[in-house]
């Protein structure tokens, strides 16, 4: 049975059958309110954003409407609702019923819609980090759930680092930062040196190297050799294999994870944002610098593959 446990996030269990039930266990932390919650939803409702949101809206509506009559005590409190794809259920310990009631009362006192707020919060907690796509398309063969989530995360990471490296050609301070990161890193430095000696595109090699560094820790969790190793077997023989055989040509890596129509659409969107929403682009750019030029493993922690950077 596929399982996915995200550090600091939900635990998700499901079966590959289309008519199976997806069980999501998480802790709802909303302002000063906190309590454990379990959601059970039909697997058929995942993979379509409209049906996903409709399912979480129905759960939140039932949760708010039935909370008034709920009683604290021992055991668990269960709320069920009918969905177009089956039935949904939310379970919380009865000892936390008073916390749920206070949360709903506080949201109303602030003038907020409790259903909308809880629906948005539950949806964001349970459907970020590609959880919905993983549930809808269970990995087959030798692929693992964690490995699939990692590969789903990589295209956006490559776009971000590609923009950072391109901007560094016009930003001396950013260029100095990237040069220092590569010069101080015992793994990136030899890869970039081999790329230069082998006639590979050095800028592309820097992109590959920075993505590999940003996801350190995630590679081990997913059983992945990393971005620049030629294979898992060659990674183990890095000290003895000839330089050209130790590493992958960065062009091959970018062709796999960056180039293509999806990158073109995303890059166009980023350029439009930079032109028409410079403040928003600057916030995004700063977050990229934090995740991809910060501590090794910063992106692995940001994408919740590991609890903290290495």
Image (tube, rainbow, N blue to C red):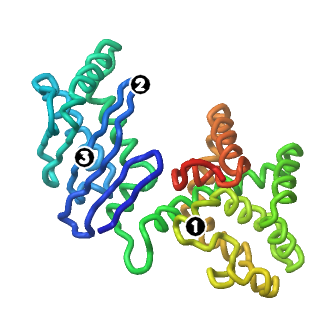
Q: Is residue 287 above or below residue 241?
A: above
Is 46 left, or right, of 237 in this rendering?
left
Displayed quadrant of residue 246 = bottom right
Which circle's residue, 3 or 1, is located before the other in the chain?
3
Residue at the (40%, 23%) spot, across then down: 32
**What residue is shown with label 1?**
220
Counting from the top left corner in percent of width and height, residue 15 is at: 25, 66
Spatial separation of the CA atoms under disc 3 and disc 1: 30 Å
Residue at the (16%, 54%) spot, across then down: 85
Front position among marks 1 and 2: 1
Crowding at mark 1 (Cα within 10 Å: few <14, some 14-19, many 20+): few
Is 262 left, or right, of 13 in this rendering?
right
Query: Which element type, helix, strand or loop, lies under badge 1?
Result: helix
Counting from the top left corner in percent of width and height, residue 239 is at: 79, 81
Counting from the top left corner in percent of width and height, residue 207 is at: 73, 61
**What residue is shown with label 3?**
39
Q: Residue lying farthest top?
A: 109
Q: Name the one closer to the observer, 24 or 148.
A: 24
Which circle's residue, 1 or 2, is located before the other in the chain?
2
Crowding at mark 3 (Cα within 10 Å: few <14, some 14-19, many 20+): many
Crowding at mark 2 (Cα within 10 Å: few <14, some 14-19, many 20+): few
Q: Are marks 2 and 3 in contact (CB under 8 Å)?
A: no
Residue at the (13%, 53%) spot, across then down: 86
Displayed quadrant of residue 214 = bottom right
**What residue is shown with label 2?**
31
Counting from the top left corner in percent of width and height, residue 143 is at: 44, 75
Query: Which element type, helix, strand or loop, lies under badge 2?
Result: loop
Q: Name the one closer to the observer, 37 or 272.
A: 37
Spatial separation of the CA atoms under disc 1 and disc 2: 34 Å
Q: Is residue 90 above or below residue 258?
A: above
Which circle's residue, 2 or 3, is located before the other in the chain?
2
**Mark on residue 125?**
none
């Amino acid at each position: 049975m596929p399982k996915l446990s995200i550090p600091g996030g939900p635990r998700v269990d499901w079966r590959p059958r289309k008519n199976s039930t997806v069980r999501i266990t998480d802790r709802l932390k909303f302002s000063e309110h906190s309590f454990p919650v379990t959601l059970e939803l039909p697997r058929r409702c995942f993979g379509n954003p409209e049906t996903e949101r409709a399912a979480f809206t129905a759960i939140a509506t039932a949760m708010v409407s039935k909370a008034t009559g709920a009683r604290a005590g021992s055991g668990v409190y269960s709320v069920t609702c009918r969905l177009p794809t089956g039935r949904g259920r939310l379970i919380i310990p009865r000892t936390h019923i008073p916390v749920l009631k206070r949360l709903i009362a506080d949201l109303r006192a602030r003038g907020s819609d409790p259903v909308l707020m809880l629906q948005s919060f539950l949806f964001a907690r349970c459907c970020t980090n590609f959880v919905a796509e993983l549930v809808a398309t269970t990995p087959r063969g030798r692929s693992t759930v964690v490995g699939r989530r990692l590969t789903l995360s990589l295209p956006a990471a490559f776009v971000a680092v590609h923009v950072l490296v391109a901007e560094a050609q016009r930003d001396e301070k950013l260029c100095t930062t990237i040069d220092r990161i590569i010069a101080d890193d015992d793994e990136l430095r030899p890869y970039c040196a081999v790329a230069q000696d082998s006639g590979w595109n050095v800028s592309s090699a820097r992109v590959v190297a920075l993505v590999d560094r940003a996801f350190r820790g995630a590679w081990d969790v997913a059983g992945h050799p990393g971005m620049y190793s030629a294979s898992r077997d060659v990674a183990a023989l890095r000290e003895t294999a000839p330089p050209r055989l130790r590493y992958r040509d960065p062009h091959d890596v970018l062709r796999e994870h960056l180039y293509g129509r999806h990158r073109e659409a995303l890059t166009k969107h980023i350029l439009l944002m930079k032109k028409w929403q410079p403040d928003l682009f600057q916030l995004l750019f700063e977050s990229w610098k934090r995740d991809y030029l910060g501590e090794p493993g910063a992106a692995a922690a940001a994408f919740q593959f590991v609890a903290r950077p290495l």
